[in-house]
Image (spheres, grey):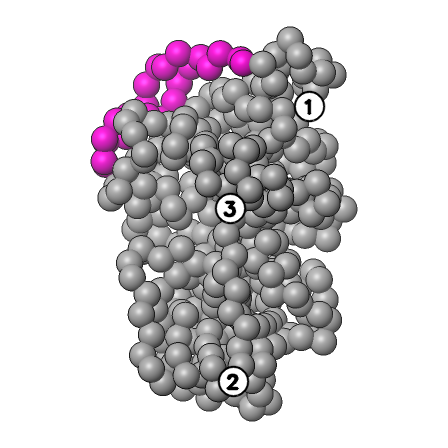
Amino acid sequence: MKALVLEDIAKLTYKDVPDPVLKQGEVMLKIKACGICSSDIPRIFKTGTYHFPTVPGHEFSGEIIDCASDVDKSLIGQRAVAFPLLPCGKCNSCLEEEYSRCSDYNYFGSRCDGAFAEYLAVPVWNIVTFSDRIPYTTAALCEPASVAKHCVDKGQIKNTDTVTVIGTGTIGFLAALWTRSMGAKKVIVVGRNEKKLEFAKKLGIEFTINMAEENFAEKFSEIMDNNGSDVVLECVGSVSAVENSIKFAKKGGRIVLTGNPEGDISLNKDIYWKILRNELTVTGSWNSSYKSDINNWKETTAALEDGSLDIAGLITQKFPLEKYEEALTTIRDHNIFSVKVMFEI
């Protein structure tokens, strides 16, 4: 099969590799679409994966074309997405079904080969099927959409709440769309890129704030009627984003930190004091929930099926796998507008 193989930092090669071999409990996915995550960019160009060579890619959808002998053959021909985390199943977190907290997990696309490829063998436990009402490219957004749903759930949002989302990346937009679909009173998207803030309005987000403008604090107060936000969802992972989360939250408000930082995060004393004096609740959110009673993946596919979550518009560019250089340039070149760049395989 053809695959994109990361052989060293910044050395990505489109080449023939052996087809995956099914193990017990697995299905074979013919990959139809795979999104390029923002985390894939430093992984490819700066830090590398956990070993070389590795096939990246963890936001994928495909068709089940084969099953191991111990797997129900009726799955063949069905469309599916896959929770990309492979938990150990033995640690305390796994026994509590908190798989994102697993102490010894594997992960498609970083710790083991992922879906920048034509085929991938996946444990049937990780599979969530969906109907042909959902295009494969839209279904490949289930991974970031499930991460965003987990973030939103951590905010315990009510229909009387005002919610501020900091960040205009894929997760930020998805968090805003989830929040709006859940009936929040008011949703504000905050960022520094005017084109992306205009894009947010096209997605149906009424209120946006550009933090690059000098009067952004005044604009926030005006939108909020001089009150802070009940819930702030931080989806960047920078010092300024965390600081503004604390500034934007009302007294007694809730902050959910989701952004994955590239460097250290430090807070000055006056900012930190606001957490104490305003009695803010600060919660971390990591990955998504895949529990038997709360499964963000099944929630996402259900919302896509019934149309309550419309996210196809987040895909701004599609490329075949062999055009990977153009796809990665599209993401890295700030002169090119992009939100989600997708491989269509």
Q: Kindly give the residue lying farthest to the right in the view shown.
A: 306
Q: Is residue 330 visible?
A: no
Judging by the rendered image, the residue that carries numbered circle 1 is: 78
Q: Observer-nearest residue: 41 or 284?
A: 284
Q: Position of residue 296 (x, y in %)?
A: 64, 47
Q: Is residue 130 left or right of residue 141?
A: right
Highlighted range, magenta: 1-23
Q: Residue at x 71, y 13 (%)?
A: 73
**Looking at the picture, does residue 215 appear above or below residue 142?**
below
Judging by the rendered image, the residue that carries numbered circle 2 is: 278
Q: Kindly give the residue lying farthest to the top in the view shown.
A: 69
The part of the image, by quadrant, that contains residue 158 is bottom right
Q: Position of residue 102 (x, y in %)?
A: 50, 41
| Contact between labelled residues 1 and 2, with CB atoms less than 8 Å apart | no
Query: What is the number of the mark on residue 210?
Result: none
Secondary structure category for the residue under label 3:
helix
Q: Amino acid at mark 2?
A: Asn
Q: Observer-nearest residue: 339 or 76?
A: 76
Q: Position of residue 50 (x, y in %)?
A: 32, 34
Q: Quadrant of the N terminus?
A: top left
Q: Position of residue 324 (x, y in %)?
A: 35, 33
Can residue 24 be found in the magenta stretch? no
Judging by the rendered image, the residue that carries numbered circle 3 is: 101
**Disc 3 versus disc 1: nearer the observer:** 3
Secondary structure category for the residue under label 1:
loop
Q: Amino acid at mark 3?
A: Arg
Disc 3/disc 1 C-alpha distance (Å): 30 Å
Disc 2/disc 1 C-alpha distance (Å): 51 Å
| Mark earlier in primary sequence (2, 1) | 1
| Contact between labelled residues 3 and 2, with CB atoms less than 8 Å apart | no
Q: Residue at x 28, y 58 (%)?
A: 263
| Contact between labelled residues 1 and 3, with CB atoms less than 8 Å apart | no
